[in-house]
Amino acid sequence: MFLIGFGFSEVLILLNDITTLQIENANQHSILLNEARI
């Protein structure tokens, strides 16, 4: 039971990291687009 709970929290942390990375990449991309427009 403990192992299942630990594995689940690990997956949640991993998903959170991936989502954060995607948001940061999207922000960088929009910044690049804005600079290109100027």
Image (spheres, rainbow, N blue to C red):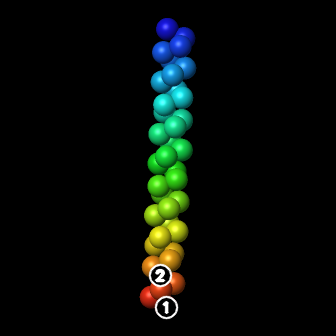
Q: How many marks?
A: 2
Amino acid type shown at disc 1: Ile
Q: Position of residue 19 (x, y in %)?
A: 47, 48
Callout 1 secondary element = loop
The residue positioned farthest toward the top in the image shown? 1
- Circle number at residue 6: none
Q: Look at the numbered discs 2 and 1 and tell me whether their residues touch, using CB distance below 8 Å.
A: yes
Q: Position of residue 16 (x, y in %)?
A: 50, 42
- Circle number at residue 38: 1
Q: Position of residue 34 (x, y in %)?
A: 47, 81
Amino acid type shown at disc 2: Asn
**Residue at figure coordinates x 47%, y 86% from the top left:** 36
Disc 2 crowd rating (10 Å Cα; few below 14, some 14-19, many 20+) is few
Callout 2 secondary element = helix
**Residue at figure coordinates x 49%, y 33% from the top left:** 12
Relative to 12, residue 38 above or below: below
Relative to 22, residue 9 above or below: above
Q: Position of residue 21 (x, y in %)?
A: 52, 53
**Residue at figure coordinates x 52%, y 26% from the top left:** 9
Disc 2 to disc 1, how far (Cα)? 6 Å
Relative to 11, residue 33 above or below: below
Q: Which residue is mark 2?
A: 34
The residue positioned farthest toward the bottom in the image shown? 38
**Residue at figure coordinates x 52%, y 68% from the top left:** 28
Disc 1 crowd rating (10 Å Cα; few below 14, some 14-19, many 20+) is few
